[in-house]
Amino acid sequence: MAAIMATSVPLSHASATPVATASGLLAMLKETDPILRSYALTNLLKVVDTLWHEVAESLPDLEEIAEDLDLDLPTRQTAAAVASRVFFHLEEPVQALRLALEGGEENFDVVNDRKSAYVECLVAAAIEAYIKKKRALADGVVGDGDEEKKKMDDDDDEEEPDI
């Protein structure tokens, strides 16, 4: 009977006990119920900075959720924000920036969170991407975009986000 009562507690009333592993939350990403997936993403966002190494294994799932237009916008944005944080910890600032921009202002606040290492790193990545684009334009690498992309790919194997 106690087990039944424990499972009937609404998700919003779950305890605030620190999470030692992300495995349960990551398993919930595979669920078809959007409420469970949203709950998992919201809680992953709270612990991703300490458990990013576990969450990294689920980056393809997070990116898939972030791009799934059948899901509601807040769910997609939270998935993008979680993935962005993981890429930040993996020292992939271009990917982190791309996903942070998809994550929306609620998850990537450059004004109120500007002193955090995460925001500082992504702002620097944005400035670097801007400088690369300006240099490419100044070098006359304008046109159908293929030439510019080839030059940027030669300079760096990472794709630059559109800023």
Image (cartoon, rainbow, N blue to C red):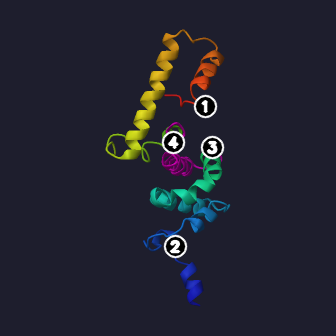
Furthest residue to the top? 140
SS for callout 3: helix
SS for callout 2: loop
Q: Position of residue 126 (x, y in %)?
A: 45, 31
> What residue did someone put label 3 on?
67
Q: Position of residue 30 (x, y in %)?
A: 67, 60
> What residue did someone put label 2 on?
10
Using the image, determine if residue 106 lies above or below residue 51: above
Q: For the residues marked 1 and 3, what is the alpha-carbon distance in whole angstroms?
A: 22 Å
Q: Is residue 14 left or right of residue 150?
A: left
Considering only order in the chain, which callout, 3 or 2, is on the residue closer to the N terminus? 2
Image depth: mark 4 or mark 1 in front:
1
Image depth: mark 2 or mark 3 in front:
3
Callout 4, which amino acid?
Answer: Ala
Residue visible at 50% across and 60% down? Answer: 51
SS for callout 1: loop
Using the image, determine if residue 45 lies above or below residue 136: below
Image depth: mark 2 or mark 1 in front:
1
Q: Are marks 1 and 3 in contact (CB under 8 Å)?
A: no
> What residue did someone put label 4 on?
96
> What residue did someone put label 1 on?
157
Image depth: mark 1 or mark 3 in front:
1
Q: For the residues marked 2 and 4, what is the alpha-carbon distance in whole angstroms?
A: 33 Å
Checking the image for residue 104, the label placed there is none
Residue visible at 52% across and 73% down? Answer: 10
Callout 1, which amino acid?
Answer: Asp
Considering only order in the chain, which callout, 4 or 3, is on the residue closer to the N terminus? 3
Q: Position of residue 71 (x, y in %)?
A: 62, 50
Image depth: mark 3 or mark 4 in front:
4
Callout 3, which amino acid?
Answer: Glu
Q: For the residues marked 3 and 4, what is the alpha-carbon distance in whole angstroms?
A: 15 Å
Considering only order in the chain, which callout, 1 or 2, is on the residue closer to the N terminus? 2
